[in-house]
Image (cartoon, rainbow, N blue to C red):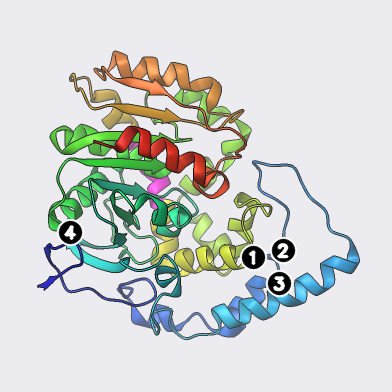
Amino acid sequence: MVQDNLGHANFVVTQNWFGVRSNNHAQEQAFTMTSNTAQCSGILGPKSGFAAEKKYGPRVWKPVAVFVMAACVAIYGRSSPWQMADPEVESLGGGFVSDTAQVNGTTLHCVRGGVGPAVILLHGFPEDWYEYHRIMPQLAKQFTVVAVDLRGIGGSAATAGGYDAANMAQDVHQLAEHLHLERVYVVGHDIGGMVAYAFSRRCPKMSRGVMMLDAPLPGLGPWDAVKANPITWHIRFQQTPGLPEQLLAGREAIYLRHFLDSDTFGDADVARYARAYAAPDHLRAALEIYRAFPANEKFNAAQKSAISVPFVLAPRKNSPFEELMPSFADALRAHGCANVEIEVIENSVHFVADEQPDAVVQLIERHASL
């Protein structure tokens, strides 16, 4: 046990690239410069399905491609990602540390800092804790900020199962208890929003409030309309047994670039997120999260007890989810949630914390402050 900068008796920290080793060290060493350089040849792909395509002229394309190839070699050309301290944590400024904890049958990684009421940040697909790096320093001025890698993603260990939102909410609950956090405010984007809602249901007395950033809820209201929208084609693809693992192995950066808008995410961003998903057990974990959606549907549909936890549904303006949010809000109220409101985030695509960090900070400050 050690004393942390927040004054808590705490666990021994591991300050390395993602904070925790894979369960299979041989798999870590398998990611060689050759395989990942081949992957990087496709990293300069089209923009996200959430935005319009942007084309580059040949005078720009060639030097950019050369630069990206060199950057990818530098990023991927290490036998193991845990051989050095994480510069991204250091870039957040003083007071932030990379921690790991044994919780709920797995090892969970988080980055934490700041002082004040606790705010837990849960990422979506295809990101990890770093999704919130633009807002963490500002939030840390008045909150204890904990950005978590969900089970099996980034620095958190992959397991054979347990990827349904209710179980991952238990991961977060045990982490909060381990950090001696009380009455936490949970912010979740995309998949993280589903876990945040499950957290409020499993731990209503510990929840100060929940904010879901551009996130639908399986099994409630217009969920079938979400699944039927062509923009969510990847849900069915990633739920397919066995096939995505074979198609995506070694091509993670190409696949992730499809979702990550090139106006917001540089090639270095895509490369680091690809690294967070690249180990075979981590890629499988990301897919298992989607395969657990039917379990999430059943869990959410069954929750009908009255709770007073404040909920904020925060879609981006003109999102495919925005027009459905009033129906999701009505469904939550019908399932016992007495305090639900909608806040629309302007000038964003889907990754609101990356695209409109100031707006997201202001939103969290307004709702998470005591």
**Sequence-earlier tag: 4 or 3:** 3
Vertical order, 232 against 35 (above or below) = above
Counting from the top left corner in percent of width and height, residue 79 is at 47, 86
Counting from the top left corner in percent of width and height, residue 131 is at 46, 54
What whole-number distance in Å separates the C-alpha atoms at marks 2 and 3?
7 Å
Quarter of the image with the N terminus is: bottom left
Give yes or no for contact between labels 2 and 4 (Cβ–Cβ under 8 Å): no
What whole-number distance in Å separates the C-alpha atoms at marks 2 and 4?
38 Å
In the rendered image, residue 294 lying in the magenta stretch gets the answer yes
Give yes or no for contact between labels 1 and 2 (Cβ–Cβ under 8 Å): yes
- Look at the image and give the residue range highlighted in magenta: 288-296
Q: Mark 1 against mark 3, which lies toward the viewer?
A: 1
Residue identifier under label 4: 103
**Sequence-earlier tag: 1 or 2:** 2
The residue type indicated by label 3 comes to Ser
What whole-number distance in Å separates the C-alpha atoms at marks 4 and 3?
38 Å
Give yes or no for contact between labels 1 and 4 (Cβ–Cβ under 8 Å): no
The residue type indicated by label 2 comes to Leu
Residue 34 visible, this orientation: yes
Counting from the top left corner in percent of width and height, residue 196 is at 31, 39
User: Residue, x 17% and y 59% (percent of image)?
Assistant: 103
Residue identifier under label 3: 41
Element under disc 3 = loop
User: Main structural element of the magenta stretch: helix, strand or loop?
Assistant: helix
The residue type indicated by label 4 comes to Val
Give yes or no for contact between labels 1 and 3 (Cβ–Cβ under 8 Å): no
Residue 267's label in the rendered image is 1
Q: Is residue 273 left or right of residue 231?
A: left
What whole-number distance in Å separates the C-alpha atoms at marks 1 and 3?
11 Å
- Residue found at the far front of this picture: 141
**Sequence-earlier tag: 1 or 3:** 3
Vertical order, 313 against 237 (above or below) = above
